[in-house]
Image (spheres, grey):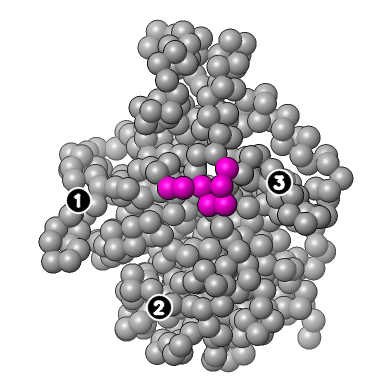
């Protein structure tokens, strides 16, 4: 039976037991194989679309533990990054060969499903090799993939379900939740979004304030920005038509994004040194701009248009997030023994952390997520967590705090510090403000990838969210 026909039959609703061919029985790089079961294979996300997944059962009581879906963002970046470098049970080591058990893995308390989405990302692919897509199509494809997972693993169909993600997951997760909340067969309990892109306008406007008050811009530039971009106490750094504002914003963007600062963690060094907007590695062009900030600014728009027109961009280009090092996961996942262990299709491409092809052809249909959040909140039965590492500049905490405030929900608990225990003593993990069915929480000292920077604090936060305990 061909993969297209099989996918079509599964989408028509034919159920079957969890395929034994998907279980990972030996994973290279581990000193000892895990006591919990884990599976890797493909989910049907529409005719001819095959999304790679890696599913790890909870380390205790998987039958009664919640099911958590995790999506990294981009658009076009792989959820294997979340698995291997953030909160998966095995963390890749710098040698690109060895895996180390994660003391703060999220599957200690939940069954976690990592999906590489959309097709064209990581090991996911489509039969026609066409990867142009958009927010609406991706939401539906992710829903179909989730449904297919529960056809393969029906024993989890009644478990509490949580949708979680990071970065452009700020779009993926709420738009997926719109589909899931309409399906009574799914036991959706809530969503969590980490350092999410919730509104382009709010993210841009808040980032300029963040940059100034973190000492990046200087008083003269700040005065000019106030003079040219602001009126009657309201500033527009997002799509201001004032030419002087545009010129000053170009200076600002150069400092924030192109001077060599690590936009994912302001206080961390830039891995590999100051990268510039692009570089060459062998005969490949390496680019770093995922295209989520200041997209209305002429300099950013023209730069991306010119990049996409370059002949090299059609075949020999790699998209690496700036100031990060994806060599270790790329080395590990492209090892033939690892691909075999994870049941990766021979039709799947070489694994990259982000897909330039998916990113460059991706159509962004939603400029803000207000409607999706208000729909979830209006149902009055889902709990929502919006959390941010407070030194991230890609999706800064101030913007997501403004976004949550803009939803105008009733405050239940005023903004306060939240605590976690480390070494037998309490420490401040950050700050939290709780509204009816939604909370905004910061993680002190963490950047864009919160569990990477503050693993224990992140696990504590995740545990309290899943268990519906006070933060």
**Is residue 404 rendered to the left or right of residue 71?**
left
Res. 87 image quadrant: bottom left
The residue under the point 44% across, 54% down is 449
Magenta extent: 268-274
The mark that comes first in sequence, 3 or 1, is: 3
Predominant secondary structure, magenta span = loop
Q: Is residue 328 above or below residue 391?
A: below
Residue 269 on the magenta segment: yes
Mark nearer the viewer, 2 or 3? 3
First along the sequence among labels 2 and 1 = 2
Q: Are marks 2 and 1 in contact (CB under 8 Å)?
A: no
**Residue 241 relative to residue 424: left or right:** right
Q: Which image quarter: residue 332?
A: bottom right
Secondary element type, mark 2: strand
- Residue sitting at x 46%, y 39%: 393
User: To which residue does mark 2 refer?
Assistant: 101
Foreground label between 3 and 1: 3
- Tell me: residue 352, above or below residue 158: above
The residue identified by callout 3 is 279
Locate residue 374: give its quadrant.
top left
| Classed neighbour count for the residue bearing mark 1: other residues with Cα under 10 Å, few (<14), some (14–19), many (≥20) | few
Distance in Å between CA atoms under marks 3 and 1: 40 Å
Residue 456: percent from the left, percent from the top?
29, 63
| Residue depicted at 41% across the width and 60% down the height | 452
Instruction: Estimate the x, y position of residue 421 in percent, counting from the top left.
Output: 18, 62
Residue 7 in view here:
yes
Residue count near mark 3 (Cα–Cα under 10 Å), binned few <14, some 14–19, many ≥20: few
């Amino acid at each position: 039976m061909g993969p297209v026909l099989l996918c079509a039959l599964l989408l028509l609703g034919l159920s079957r037991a969890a395929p034994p061919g998907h279980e990972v029985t030996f994973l290279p790089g581990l000193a000892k194989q895990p006591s919990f079961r884990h599976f890797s294979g493909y989910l049907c996300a529409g005719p001819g679309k095959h999304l790679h997944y890696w599913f790890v059962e909870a380390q205790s009581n998987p039958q009664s533990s919640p099911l958590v879906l995790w999506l990294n963002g981009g658009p076009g970046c792989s959820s294997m990054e979340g698995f291997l470098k953030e909160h998966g049970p095995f963390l890749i080591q710098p040698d690109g060969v060895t895996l180390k058990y994660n003391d703060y893995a999220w599957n200690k308390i939940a069954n976690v499903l990592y999906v590489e989405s959309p097709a064209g990302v990581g090991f996911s692919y489509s039969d026609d090799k066409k990867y142009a897509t958009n927010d609406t199509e991706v939401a539906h494809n992710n829903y179909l993939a989730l449904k297919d997972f529960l056809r393969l693993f029906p024993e989890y169909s009644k478990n509490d379900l949580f949708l979680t993600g990071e970065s452009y997951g700020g779009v993926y997760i709420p738009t997926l939740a719109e589909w899931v909340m309409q399906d009574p067969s799914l036991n959706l309990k809530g969503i969590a979004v980490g350092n999410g892109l919730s509104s382009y306008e709010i993210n841009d406007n808040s980032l300029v304030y963040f940059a100034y008050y973190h000492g990046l811009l200087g008083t003269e530039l700040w005065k000019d920005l106030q003079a040219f971009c602001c009126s009657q106490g309201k500033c527009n750094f997002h799509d201001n038509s004032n030419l002087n504002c545009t010129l000053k914003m170009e200076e600002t963007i150069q400092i924030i994004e192109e001077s060599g600062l690590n936009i994912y963690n302001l206080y961390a060094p830039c891995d590999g040194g100051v990268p510039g907007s692009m570089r060459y590695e062998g005969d490949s062009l390496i680019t770093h701009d995922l295209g989520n900030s200041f997209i209305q600014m002429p300099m950013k728009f023209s730069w991306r248009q010119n990049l996409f027109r370059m002949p090299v961009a059609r075949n020999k280009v790699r998209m690496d997030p700036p100031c990060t090092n994806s060599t270790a996961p790329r080395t590990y996942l492209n090892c033939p023994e690892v691909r075999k262990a994870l049941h990766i299709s021979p039709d799947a491409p070489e694994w990259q952390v982000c897909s330039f092809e998916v990113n460059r052809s991706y159509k962004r249909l939603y400029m803000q997520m207000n409607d999706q959040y208000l729909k979830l909140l209006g149902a009055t039965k889902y709990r929502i967590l919006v959390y941010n590492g407070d030194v991230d500049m890609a999706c800064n905490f101030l913007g997501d705090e403004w976004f949550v405030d803009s939803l105008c929900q009733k405050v239940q608990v005023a903004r306060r510090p939240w605590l976690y225990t480390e070494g037998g003593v309490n420490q401040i993990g950050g700050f939290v403000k709780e509204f009816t069915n939604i909370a905004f929480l910061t993680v002190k000292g963490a950047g864009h990838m919160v569990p990477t920077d503050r693993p224990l604090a992140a696990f504590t936060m995740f545990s309290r969210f899943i268990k519906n305990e006070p933060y």
